[in-house]
Amino acid sequence: MSIVLRPSHGALLIVVALASACRSSPPGQASDSDSVTQEFTYERARQEMVARQIEARGVTHEGVRRAMRDVPRHEFVPYQYGDLAYDDRPLPIGYRQTISQPYVVALMTELIAPEPGDRILEVGTGSGYQAAVVAELVAEVYSIELIPELATSAAERLQRLGYDNVHVRAGDGYLGWPEHAPFDGILVTAGADHVPEPLVEQLAVGGRMVIPVGDSQADQVLRVLEKLPDGSIDSRDVVPVRFVPLLREPGA
């Protein structure tokens, strides 16, 4: 989802912009040799992406770095942007939505401190890339997408790529997914003017939620909340951000 991230130490400006809809399937089939060559190119680009965009910016969680090396980001972008899949940039995925740049995905994943047995809720599936990265590190991912067409395409893509531990549904992410709560971690990929209470209720004791919060797009912070044993919430603000608003179903 869309974000403008300004690291607190002034190192880089990261922009995730909105863009228009685009196609998602190639015009023809490549030869076997071309496919092998392309996959090698993608593999090399993925390794460079992690070295230059993830490790160099301070992401230290080795599991996150491994997941970023393993997940084929080019599978989650429209074919015409394949050559840009491992650049430090967002890319349009249709419906005025984007796939976030790799650093943002890695940062948010690291902040929830994923463990192998965890069950994670994601609000805002998009193309499914964030869900796939998290799925490499935890037991189950439950992802909610407001736009039905994106939910359907992401579910099909994740299934095709073998992410059987990701469950996608179309719906209002503000309400969470109570049937499968509590969750060990919750990722919200859109900005809210307050932390949704249903999500707080669905967070397990000891679990973390990462969510952009602010009264406007110009005044947001990436916030990490942790539920303590007595049920209270400890929170800290990590970095100023700018996300698109968290949308609700009509009439909500």
Image (cartoon, grey):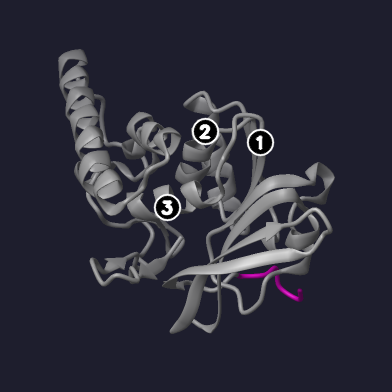
Residue that numbered label 2 is attached to: 158
- Drawn side of residue 235 relative to residue 199, left or right: left
Image disc number at residue 118: 1
Image disc number at residue 107: 3
The magenta region covers 247-252
Residue 175 seen by the camera:
no
When asked about the image quadrant of residue 48, the answer is: top left
Q: Is residue 207 above or below residue 198?
A: above
Circle nearer the N terminus (3, 1): 3
Q: CA distance from mark 1 to mark 2?
A: 19 Å
**Residue plotted at (39% across, 55% down):** 104
Amino acid found under the numbered disc labelled 3: Leu
Q: CA distance from mark 3 to mark 1?
A: 18 Å
Residue 47, given in percent of the width and then of the height, sits at 23, 33
Circle nearer the N terminus (1, 2): 1
Amino acid found under the numbered disc labelled 2: Leu
Residue 111, given in percent of the width and then of the height, sits at 51, 52
User: Which dot, 3 or 2, sits closer to the camera?
Assistant: 3
Q: Is residue 103 above or below residue 241?
A: above
As rendered, which of 164 and 57 lies closer to the eye? 57
Circle 3 crowding by C-alpha within 10 Å: few under 14, some 14–19, many from 20? some
Q: Is residue 144 above or below residue 70?
A: below
When asked about the image quadrant of residue 228, the answer is: bottom right
**Residue plotted at (42% across, 72% down):** 241
Q: State whether the magenta stretch is mostly helix, strand or loop.
A: loop
As rendered, which of 132 and 52 lies closer to the eye? 52
**Residue plotted at (47% across, 26% down):** 161
Q: CA distance from mark 3 to mark 2?
A: 21 Å
Residue 189, given in percent of the width and then of the height, sits at 53, 60
